[in-house]
Image (cartoon, rainbow, N blue to C red):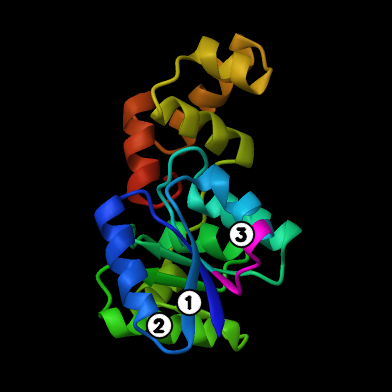
C-alpha cells in the first residue's frame, strides 16, 4: 500500500483529490493538510511514501516545503500539483528536488499513475512544461533579491521586509532597486509582475 500525504488549501479540491486517490486499491491518503508549514511535522508523524503538494499554500509555499522534505525526510518523495504551469516554476521545483510536477488540469487518472511512478523512483514531469522549461531562461535575480521581491509581492513595505530578514532598510531598498533594474521593469510592481509571469516568483 502506497501511503500518501496531500497538502491543498482549497477544501473542495482537497476533498475531491482524497476521494479520487482512495478509490485506487494500492493508494491510501494518510494525511490531508491545508497549510505548507504543517507538511514536515505531518510527514514525520505519518511517514508517507509520497507527498502531493500544491505550490501556493498558506504558512509556507509548497516548493519550500518540498525542499525541506527532501533535506530532512528524503524517503518521502514530493509530487507538486499546481495550476502554475510556468517554466520558471518548474525549474524552481527541480531545484527543490521534487520527484514530480503535474498540472491540476491533467486527466484524473494521471495523478494516481504519477504517484506510482514517483514511488518507483521515476521523475514525472508534464511533457509540455518540460519542453518549455528546457528553452526558458534562468532568473537573473540572486536568491536574496528573489526573497526580498517575494516579500514585497506579499504586500510588505521595505521597513517590514528589513525587520523580517534582519537587514537594514537601505539594504532592502538596494535589493529592490537591483531587481527592478535586472528585470528591465518600470518600478517594483512591474518587477513583481514580470517575475511572476516568468515563474521566478510564486
The residue under the point 59% across, 10% down is: 169
SS at circle 1: strand
Say whether residue 71 is visible. yes
SS at circle 2: helix
List the residue tagged with mark 1: 28
Q: x, y (%) of residue 138? A: 52, 56
Q: Which image quadrant for residue 99?
A: bottom right
In screen coordinates, is 100 left or right of 20? right
In screen coordinates, is 120 left or right of 100? right
* Quadrant in which the N terminus is drawn: bottom right
Q: x, y (%) of residue 137? A: 46, 59
The residue under the point 55% across, 75% down is: 3
In screen coordinates, is 16 left or right of 166? left
Asked whether the residues under the numbered discs 3 and 2 touch, taking CB atoms below 8 Å apart as contact, a structural biologist would say no
The residue under the point 33% across, 59% down is: 14
Asked whether the residues under the numbered discs 3 and 1 touch, taking CB atoms below 8 Å apart as contact, a structural biologist would say no
The residue under the point 40% across, 65% down is: 81
Mark 3–mark 2 Cα distance, whole angstroms, equals 22 Å
Mark 1–mark 2 Cα distance, whole angstroms, equals 11 Å
Q: Which image quadrant for residue 172?
A: top right
Q: Which of the numbered marks, if any, corresponds to residue 68?
A: none
Range covered by the magenta-colored residues: 45-50
Examine the rendered structure and indicate whether residue 200 appears above or below residue 149: below
1 or 2: tag closer to the N-terminus: 1
Closest to the camera, between mark 1 and mark 2, is: 1
* Quadrant in which the C terminus is drawn: top left
Question: Number of numbered discs present?
Answer: 3
Q: Which of the numbered marks, if any, corresponds to residue 96?
A: 3
Q: x, y (%) of residue 93? A: 53, 61
Examine the rendered structure and indicate whether residue 157 appears above or below residue 13: above
Say whether residue 83 is visible. no
Q: Nearer the viewer, residue 118 or 131?
A: 118
Amino acid at each position: 500500500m502506497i501511503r500518501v500525504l496531500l497538502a491543498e488549501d482549497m477544501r473542495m479540491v482537497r476533498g475531491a483529490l482524497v476521494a479520487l486517490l482512495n478509490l485506487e486499491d494500492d493508494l491510501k491518503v494518510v494525511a490531508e493538510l491545508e497549510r505548507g508549514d504543517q507538511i514536515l511535522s505531518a510527514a514525520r508523524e505519518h511517514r508517507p511514501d509520497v507527498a502531493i503538494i500544491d505550490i501556493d499554500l498558506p504558512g509556507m509555499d509548497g516548493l519550500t516545503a518540498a525542499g525541506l522534505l527532501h533535506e530532512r525526510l528524503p524517503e518521502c518523495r514530493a509530487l507538486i500539483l499546481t495550476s502554475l504551469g510556468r517554466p520558471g516554476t518548474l525549474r524552481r521545483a527541480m531545484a527543490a528536488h521534487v520527484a514530480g510536477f503535474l498540472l491540476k488540469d491533467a486527466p484524473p487518472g494521471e495523478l494516481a499513475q504519477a504517484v506510482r511512478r514517483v514511488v518507483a523512483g521515476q521523475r514525472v514531469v508534464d511533457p509540455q512544461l518540460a519542453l518549455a522549461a528546457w528553452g526558458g531562461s534562468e532568473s537573473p535575480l540572486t536568491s536574496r533579491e528573489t526573497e526580498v521581491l517575494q516579500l514585497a509581492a506579499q504586500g510588505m513595505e521595505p521597513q517590514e521586509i528589513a525587520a523580517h530578514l534582519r537587514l537594514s532598510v537601505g539594504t532592502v531598498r538596494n535589493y529592490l532597486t537591483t531587481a527592478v533594474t535586472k528585470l528591465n521593469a518600470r518600478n517594483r510592481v512591474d518587477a513583481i509582475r514580470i517575475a511572476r509571469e516568468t515563474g521566478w516568483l510564486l
